[in-house]
Image (cartoon, grey):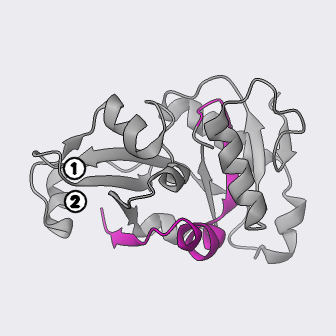
Amino acid sequence: MLTIYKGRPEDLSGRLEREIRVYDLLDSLHVEYDRLDHEPAMTMEVCAEIDAAFERMPLEAFKADQSADKGKHAIICKNLFLTNKQHTKYYLLMMPGDKKFLTKDLSAQINSARLSFAGEEEMLKYLDVTPGSVSVLGLMNDKENTVQLLIDSDVLRSEFVGCHPCMNTSSLRMHVKDLTEKILPAIHHEAIVVNL
């Protein structure tokens, strides 16, 4: 059975610097989050199992904020790192995992034709993440604001969001409100809301 912990790991040995930086950022912003450590999550099916584990466990710190109709479900996001044909513009798209990604739907909304997936070297350069670990929290490493964040409107309608701490061997659950009102302003990124 997967164990859910409050906040950062007590023992950071064996954790990569990119993951520790995430915990340092969240703690400095007083963002409350639950953490679940697991085997590498490379598919949406594995992410669904992680989400189910979060949903089974009570979220004591957030109980006061919960309304009866919202529950404690965190939306499972696909995090796609995209680029234009010329590799001059980069986008990080957060969208519900159960939605289909159609390039033409997104391209029309952001006025950028011929979108494709950015490569592993670009992920490391701009977000300091590797394939399978792409996360909105990787934007903390984009000091030059090269990457434009795109968030599907359905993600913003959820109460909680789940993401990796720049490593796909852990998952975090936090309030969407903390993402939009604390984290993004602190890392100097604004989101463009899209409808997919």
Dot 1 crowding, Cα within 10 Å, few <14, some 14–19, many 20+: few
Comparing marks 2 and 1, which lies closer to the viewer? 2
Q: Residue type at mark 2: give it.
A: Leu
- Say left or right for 146 vs 180: left
Measuring 66% from the left and 70% from the top, which residue is drawn there? 178
Residue located beneath label 1 in the image: 102
x and y, in percent, of residue 92 in the image: 37, 53
Q: Is residue 93 left or right of residue 182?
A: left
Label number found at residue 189:
none
Corner quadrant of residue 179: bottom right
23 to 31, vertically: above or below: above
* Residue type pointed to by label 1: Leu
Picture quarter with the N terminus: top right
Residue 131 at x, y percent in the picture: 43, 30
Contact between labelled residues 1 and 2, with CB atoms less than 8 Å apart: yes
List the residue tagged with mark 2: 106
Is the residue 120 above or below the residue 89 in the image?
A: above
Is residue 174 inside the magenta stretch?
yes
| Residue 97 in sight from this viewpoint | no
Q: CA distance from mark 2 to mark 1?
A: 7 Å
User: In which quadrant is the C terminus drawn?
Assistant: bottom left
In the rendered image, residue 12 lying in the magenta stretch gets the answer: no
For the record, the magenta segment spans 167-196
Judged from this view, the residue extending furthest toward the front is 144
SS label for mark 2: helix
Q: In front here: 117 or 13?
A: 13
User: Percent from the top left, x then y, of residue 155?
Assistant: 49, 64
Relative to the observer, which residue lies in front, 19 or 95?
19
- For residue 15, side relative to residue 121 (left or right): right
User: Residue at position x 49%, y 69% from top?
Assistant: 188
